[in-house]
Image (tube, rainbow, N blue to C red):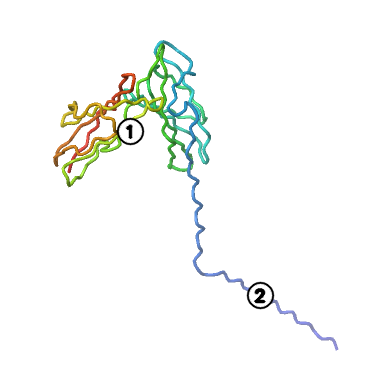
């Protein structure tokens, strides 16, 4: 007698996990890196620019490519009148027309299309030489303390004025004149200062003060830092 083979279908039910799904951690956006400056060199007397007129020449700025960067901003500052220009580029070189016989500073800001973060390079200074110049005025002193707009708290009733001087060649600075007072044209309070500071200057709470530094080199050339102001608590 023949036996019947009964085939019973087996149904497999796949059940999904009902727990929460972990969202993957987003990868950090690469930040632009700092550009390395190459030319004009730090504290250089720039003589390689192409002369455009008696008052202007074109200067070529060069820097190294920085990581995670899609564009750069070249910022050039006239150290006599403090005017600044900013130019965008995707290259690592720009040619800029500048006044001759004038000191400048420059730096590069690295930018990326993937983030709002930026990276600022070192700040270099150079002198764009003019016709018939034998000696060069010192760079305007850099005011370091108190800075522009700073609110100073002092228990002693005095502040220390601090600055940094520099020239295109080392050891050319002779001395400084310091101007300090409560108007934007302050009187001189120290002349022929050989240090780059003036300590224990008397101040009063609630008063705004103005000050600037004139740098003098061994050839008698001078430059002015420009007037800075600060307030005392």
Q: At x 15% / y 32%, what residue is drawn?
A: 182
Q: Residue 1 location in percent, x, y?
A: 86, 89
Q: Secondary structure at mark 1?
A: strand
Residue 164 found in image quarter:
top left
Q: Residue 120 location in percent, x, y?
A: 43, 37
User: In the picture shown, does residue 111 fall above or below 222?
Assistant: below
Number of the label disc, if any, that sits on residue 215: none
Q: CA distance from mark 1 to mark 2?
A: 85 Å
Q: Residue 69 location in percent, x, y?
A: 50, 38
Q: Where is mark 2, residue-wise?
A: 11
Asked whether, in this view, residue 216 is left or right of residue 231, the answer is right
Q: At x 23% / y 39%, what residue is drawn?
A: 160
Instruction: Mark 1 vs mark 2: give the one in front.
Output: 1
Q: Where is mark 1, residue-wise?
A: 164
Say few, some or many: other residues with alpha carbon within 10 Å of mark 1 (under 14 / 14 to 19 / 20 or more): some
Quarter of the image with the C terminus is: top left
Q: At x 68% / y 77%, what residue is drawn?
A: 10
Q: At x 45% / y 13%, what residue is drawn?
A: 52
Asked whether, in this view, residue 200 is left or right of residue 3, the answer is left
User: In the picture shown, does residue 6 fall above or below 201?
Assistant: below
Asked whether, in this view, residue 32 is left or right of residue 198, the answer is right
Q: Secondary structure at mark 2?
A: loop
Nearer to us in this view, 166 or 8: 166
Dot 1 or dot 2, earlier in sequence: 2
Q: Residue 75 location in percent, x, y?
A: 41, 29
């Amino acid at each position: 007698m023949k036996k019947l083979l009964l085939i019973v279908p087996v149904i497999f039910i796949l059940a999904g996990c009902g727990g929460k799904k972990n969202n993957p951690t987003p990868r950090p956006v690469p930040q632009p890196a700092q550009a390395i400056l190459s030319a004009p060199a730090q504290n250089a007397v720039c003589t390689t620019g192409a002369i455009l007129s008696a008052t202007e020449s074109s200067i070529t700025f060069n820097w190294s490519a920085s990581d995670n960067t899609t564009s750069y901003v070249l910022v050039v500052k006239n150290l006599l009148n403090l005017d600044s220009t900013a130019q965008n580029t995707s290259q690592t070189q720009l040619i800029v027309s500048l006044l001759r016989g004038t000191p400048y500073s420059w730096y590069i800001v690295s930018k990326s299309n993937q983030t709002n973060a930026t990276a600022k390079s070192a700040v270099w200074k150079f002198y764009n030489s003019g016709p018939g110049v034998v000696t060069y005025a010192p760079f305007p002193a850099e005011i370091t303390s108190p800075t522009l707009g700073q609110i100073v708290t002092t228990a002693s009733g005095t502040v220390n004025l601090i600055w940094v001087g520099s020239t295109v060649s080392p050891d050319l600075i002779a001395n400084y004149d310091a101007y300090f007072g409560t108007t934007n044209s302050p009187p001189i309070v120290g002349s022929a200062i050989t240090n780059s500071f003036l300590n224990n200057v008397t101040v009063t709470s609630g008063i705004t003060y103005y000050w600037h530094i004139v740098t003098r080199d061994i050839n008698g050339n001078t430059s002015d830092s420009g007037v800075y102001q600060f307030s005392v608590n």
